[in-house]
Amino acid sequence: MKFLDQAKIFVKSGDGGAGCVSFRREKFIEFGGPDGGNGGRGGDIVIEAVPNLNTLIDYRYAQHFKARRGYHGSGRNRSGADAETITLRVPVGTQVLDEDRETVLYDLKKAGQRVTLCRGGDGGFGNAHYKTATNQAPRQHGQGWPGEERWVWLRLKLIADCGLVGLPNAGKSTLLAATSRAKPKIADYPFTTLHPQLGVVHVDNREFVLADIPGLIEGAHDGAGLGHRFLGHVERCGVLIHLIDGTQDDVVDAYKTIRAELKAYSPVLAAKPELLVLNKCDALLPEDILEKQKQLAKAAKLKRGRGKNAVEPVRAISGATGLGVRDLLREVMEIVEAHRAAMKDEDDAAEDNAAHDGPILSVTDEAPQDFDD
């Protein structure tokens, strides 16, 4: 299935059905009168996050979604039926943005979350609604309220616990394949990965989701290479693994290039916890590994621990041979669990605040009106 993480769609809810003008005329019935029913409500446009999707490809070729209008009222005080709701199913992690692509309308982070994107118009009143003691034969009826319509953008941000960032050919796909059952394309040329990949990593009977995004190069924030549009898929991560190819000559320049692109994209993303990892150490001598670890630690302003068993702040691994990978995953797991606990506390606090505050009534909530003939 082709990966698509952005789509622009047009949505329109249904208009309300018209009310009916009708009078009761039956044989042997002494008193007749108006009996026109009300119109039905137009169909809503609802968007729902479902757990079994990971792409927006369904909205590549179907871009217009219009709900039908409510059914009209009829005689004998019969109200028209409400129109059917159209439900748009999207992956968990999808954001709904306004047409300007900057204003976030909704953020669907949990499976089963549903929001009404466009509300259907209310149905018009039939002439039975207007019957009074002084107006016993009204011929007035409502046409129903119009529905809402708008253009919106859907933007997918994959839900992952940990993200892999680095230059092309840093070994991100190799590490993902070695630690999970994901099967990304691996080759000895840059930009082998063209779209994000996810894998589930198991560590000591625990697990977390690891995301691999296409490599970044200098000037990615200006559109160089594949640009930085895929960085949105690691914005929700609790920790980043910054992977650096240990076989290149200038590892410090590689580190600074990625850090500059992260800051240019989002200060929030740049401030996330980061594990600096020197990869492909199976092809390096021990003294070369130590020297490059020191260079990276100095560039990142990381301090080495104290004591006889002090650990270098820059991790040395080999995704191909598994050197140091297990220890790295255990460290990532600890950070991920702490992040999950913090997010759970935030969600619980938000739910408590919503429960204490109670429903908020808008000052614009007025009684529905009708469009008269």
Image (tube, rainbow, N blue to C red):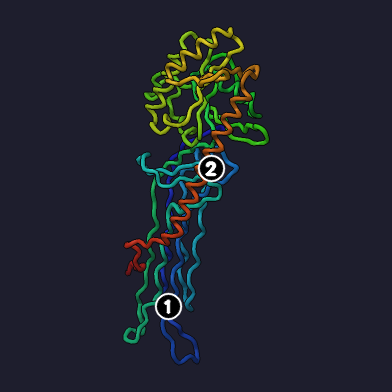
As drawn, the label of residue 218 is none
**Residue behind mark 1:** 22
- The CA span between labels 1 and 2 is 62 Å
Q: Position of residue 27 (x, y in %)?
A: 50, 89
- Look at the image and tell me in which quarter the C terminus lies: bottom left
Q: Position of residue 43 (x, y in %)?
A: 47, 58
Q: Position of residue 30 (x, y in %)?
A: 45, 92
Number of the front mark, 1 or 2: 2
- Graded by Cα atoms within 10 Å as few (under 14), some (14 to 19) or many (20 or more), the crowding at tag 1 reads many
Label 2: which secondary element: helix
345 sits to left or right of 180? left
Q: Give the residue type at disc 2.
A: Ala
As drawn, the label of residue 341 is 2
* Farthest-out residue, front: 307
Q: Toward which corner of the image does residue 23 lie, by quadrant?
A: bottom left
Q: Residue at x 64, y 36 (%)?
A: 206
The image shows residue 247, relative to residue 156, as above or below, that is: above
Label 1: which secondary element: loop
Q: Earlier in the sequence, mark 1 or mark 2?
A: 1
Q: Nearer the viewer, residue 30 or 117?
A: 117
* Farthest-out residue, right: 205
